[in-house]
Amino acid sequence: MRKTFILLAAMLTVAVQVPACTNFIVAKGASTDGSVICSYNADSYGMFQNLCHYPAATHPKGIKLKIYDWDTGEYHGEIDEAAQTYNVIGNINEWQLTIGETTYGGREEMVDSTGILDYGSLIYNTLRRAKTAREAISVMTSLVEKYGYNSSGETFTICDPNEAWIVEMMGCGPDRKLSKERTVWVAMRIPDNAICGHANQSRIGRFDMKDKKNVLYSKNVVSYARKKGWFSGKDSEFSWKNTYAKPDFSGRRICDARVWSFYNRFNKDMERYLPWAMGIDPNAEDMPLWIVPDRKLSVQDVEAAMRDHFEGTPLSLDQDVAQGNWDMPYRPTPLYFEVDGKKYFNERPTSTQQTGFSYVSQMRSWLPREIGGVMWWGNDDGNMVAYTPIYCGMTVQPECYNTPGADAVTYSDKNAFWVCNWVSNMVYPRYSQMFPSLKAVRDSLEQSYFDAQAQVEKRAQDLYATDKAAALKYLNDYSVEKAQQMLARWRELATFLIVKYNDMAVKPDKDGRFLRTKTGLGATVKRPGYTEKARRALIKDTGDKFQLR
């Protein structure tokens, strides 16, 4: 039987470019409640992202699956469909398995342009086929060995309710017809008491090839590098990243600095690795793959880390004129620019305007799997959204996260991506003035979700004991309700902001209601003018040009 199924991975509309993303990982012994937690910012200019859904299904033998590139939509070829596939909602499946990624590139000559599976197609096909992190690694590596890996160097986060793994993978070039080698890869389990992160720079250095429990790797992981003349030392001296994707200035300052800032939040000894993150000192001590935090992390802690702009560090974005009149911790693109023949760069924090979607996934081994897995999901820059709960057994997408007719160039006020971007793009240039209003709404919504979580899940467990279908419907309905409520509240926020901050003045309000005079007119507006930093920067630049005489 030869019937063709089409999988347009993640079902998104994007500009053709390499994404630059951020992942954080918390192993179960490092979290406050024993959850495994991982996060993902999907960052790419022009990206429009729906909350994808692939239903569970069984497939007759002989079914073929068409593969389209996750970034470009270009057709790559066909693979065999699995006999059994699982329900996938976003980047989590019904078994609580979660997979994220960041692209690091690495050696360009290793890209297999003839391969069928790109990194996005690989993620979603693996989620459809695997139950655990270890099984996912086996599925993922088997698929690329059979069909070829079409992307450049990639770091994957692969987590289940018990284990957290980081996997790095590269192709073996486009000449696989002359060689049986198709990919090289290495996988390392994050210790249960540790946290980890990756952000577009290869992170795995040396690894213990004798530790069969916590380290997995392709048979050719070292021999391929030897054959190419890239490594000649002992196997025990082999470093994945130094061989296949050696960190340079941008790999450290633009990429690893985001991981350093995450670690710095939860460990008082991270100053020793600041020279590495700054990227300037070639002899700086390398930052470890994982660290043990000084305290255990909650989902809220990870959400806060996804909103980071290097606050309180030497890399903070509130120290120069580029922050504008209202202390904006965002910078225009591109990352690099030139003045008088000299090249410069912008800091690249975790929270960035080009995020298409962001999530924090929570996986809990002690609950029924469809209740234990919840992906806290947002459809814009993580700093500018309220993460809403998406339970892993969901089979119906909220309309706001999968809006008919909406895409990268079609606005819809029913769509979370566009409404959230409407708000965030008002706030960005007037950050210190407008962000407190957004933050109050964001934090209030999220707190309401966390306050209700125990009761909601208790109700779901009670239903699950006698009627599993009813429990799943209950969580599905709850997740849809909260997503749609968020959208409605964000529309209100948008209109509140345009009224309150119209024409760079500020209308006074009390509890969200604008004040009026006795005669019914709008109360007198406040005109705060420049921030103190902006005033001083202006005078430093212009001297006495604007001084009253």
Image (cartoon, rainbow, N blue to C red):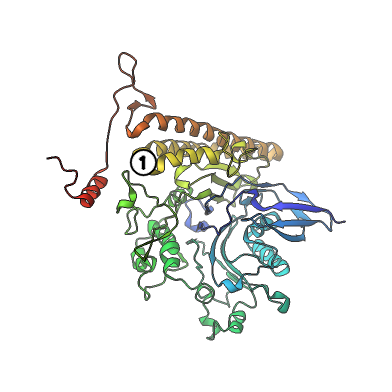
Residue closer to the observer: 468 or 420: 420
Residue closer to the observer: 36 or 493: 493
Residue closer to the observer: 125 or 188: 125
User: What's the amino acid at mark 1?
Assistant: Arg
At horizontal 58% and vertical 78% (from top left) the residue drawn is: 210
Tell me the quadrant of the picture where the C terminus can be found: top left
Farthest residue, direction top = 519
At horizontal 34% and vertical 58% (from top left) the residue drawn is: 315
The quadrant holding residue 118 is bottom right
The quadrant holding residue 395 is top right
Q: Is residue 539 left or right of residue 407?
A: left
Measured as percent of width and height from the top left, residue 195 is found at: 47, 60
Q: Residue 209, relative to residue 55: is it above or below?
A: below
Farthest residue, direction left = 549
Q: Is residue 471 visible?
A: yes
Q: Residue 172, relative to residue 450: is it above or below?
A: below
Q: Which residue is mark 1?
A: 430
Measured as percent of width and height from the top left, residue 357 is found at: 54, 48
Tell me the quadrant of the picture where the N terminus can be found: bottom right
